[in-house]
Image (tube, coloured by chain):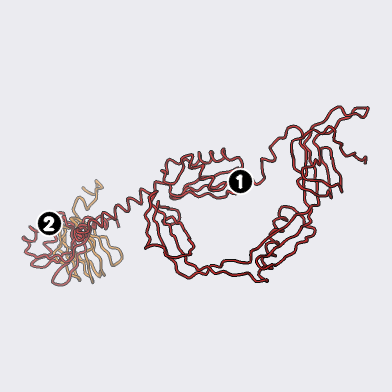
Amino acid sequence: MIESLQLPKDLMLGMPIVTVTGFHEAYIENYKGILEYSEEMILLQTKTCQIEIQGEKLHIMYYTNDEMKVEGMISSIQYFNYS
Amino acid sequence: MFVKIVKSTRGYVKLKLYGYSPERFMNLCSNHEIFLWGVENHGDYYTLYVSIHDFFKLKPMVKKTQTKIAVLERKGLPFFVYKYRKRKLFAIGLITCLFLLYSFSFFIWDITVEGNYTVTTDVLMDYLEEEDIRTGMLKREVSCENIEKMIRQKYNNITWASVKIQGTRLMIGVKENIVDIQGEDKAKQGAYDLIAEKDGVIIQMITRSGTPFVGIQSEVKAGDLLVSGQIPVKNDGGEVFAYQQVEADADIIIETTYPYEDRIERKYEEKKYTGNVKKAYRLNIGKKSIRFLLGKVKYEHYDVLETDKQVKLGNSFYLPLWIEKTEYREYEPENKIYTKEQCNKMAKERFYRYCKTLEEKGVQILENNVKIELSKSFCMTKGELKVQEKTGKSVPSGEVEGKMPLQEEET
């Protein structure tokens, strides 16, 4: 239905958007909250799943209701608990 | 960059966040649209930044999540102002200073003139003053084009004028006509004669127009008629029945003598500076002046040296402030007498200078009989110079009737 209407998926389904620049910068949009935050790992809750960013010296540059920017040496991004 | 400026003008604080669940606190913050940035994990606590405005909304969230916050740093303009709240006068001074500088920049504080030669700067300045163009006037009241026009109309020999404003300075550039127009455009009406300016013997004479009254080798006295501007017109009978009126023109070279006398006193007073200098300063603001002088000048003999300087910022931002420095230099007068060598040298130098000015005028020196005589109290340079020079002064023609013109030789 959504595909036939050609509406943006992130808006309709509330899917998270992760934009990674190289390995040191990541933008995450459409998330609901932070579950865990340490220098090695950031766990985020989104509408559909959880996103875990692993790396070193992770650092939240800024942080608003629907967008955040993470900097640091990112080694992996994993998804859990799909629904 | 812009965000940074806004943040620092609004003010922000660095917080230490610790306790039961800091993550929940952060989530709550974002849900309440409280902007957090620079979040860092330091193991058992977090540090983060929040604006002052949002800081006061944190209290319910802190209670809810059972976290604790501590302010680590305060940054931004509101804190800066608070810190220096007792230095209001300083701030007021700074602002008035800037304001004064800004308002001074609306005025003209200096006028310079360039390229003038015969019209002196003082004359031009006086003229500008008459036309209400002076230092201290508003810049926007200055119309450069009008000034250019005025100058060109007032002075005939200024052929080109440019006026521009640079900073607070009004720069006037002029070009003068090097060739003297007056001599050329003075259309002479009627007859003009050439008369001798000095006594002497005519060496050479070429007449272009007019009737010559003297010839080569004739002796003339100052004021004698050399060439007449009236040319006799003869009828068939050889009788003069009319005179044609012309402007006499001729190259006449005359041999004449110049007396020369120069007396130099051998006694003179030499100033021996003691090195004691007393300085006085005067500060002129507009037309008012404040004088700073420490005590009185106690010297018996002293020279006064005055220097005037206008205060400026950069190259062309002149301020209405002048610093006048007056120096009093003490000296001891010492009576001395020139030696023979010194006298000779000085006399020669002065004579040489005199000859040079003559040569510059177009006088050719043939020989000189000038001698230097020394006596006890003075040194006398005396003698005569034999020279060749051009002569002939144009004057309105007088009556020539009765005078005999030189008979022209047929060639």
Q: Quadrant of residue B58?
A: bottom left
Q: Is residue B383 left or right of residue B87?
A: right
At 16% from the left and 64% from the top, the residue drawn is B15
Q: Which mark is residue B56?
A: 2
Depth check, front residue: B361 or B83:
B361
- Is residue A16 among what the camera can see? no
In the image, residue B117 lies at what x, y percent?
60, 49
Question: Which amino acid type corresponds to the residue marked 1 in the rendered image?
Answer: Glu
Q: In this view, does A57 lie to the left or right of A36?
A: right
**Which colour denotes chain B?**
red
Label 2 or label 1, whichever lies nearer to me, is 1
At 72% from the left and 35% from the top, the residue drawn is B188
Q: Residue B292 carries which label?
A: none
Q: Earlier in the sequence, mark 2 or mark 1?
A: 2
Q: Which residue is the site of mark 1? A: B176
Q: In which quarter of the image is the C terminus of chain B?
A: top right
Q: Quadrant of residue B261?
A: bottom right
Element type at marker 1?
Answer: strand
Q: Is residue B75 left or right of residue B315?
A: left
Q: Quadrant of the N terminus of chain B?
A: bottom left
Depth check, front residue: B10 or A31:
B10
What chain does mark 2 sit on?
B
Q: In this view, does B173 lie above or below B43?
A: above
Element type at marker 2?
Answer: loop
In the image, residue B42 lies at what x, y percent?
17, 71
Question: Which amino acid type corresponds to the residue marked 2 in the rendered image?
Answer: Phe
Q: In this view, does A11 lie above or below B65?
A: above
Measure how far apart labels 2 and 1 are at the Cα level: 76 Å
Q: How many numbered tags mark residues here?
A: 2
Q: Does the residue at mark 2 contact the one at mark 1 (Cβ under 8 Å)?
A: no
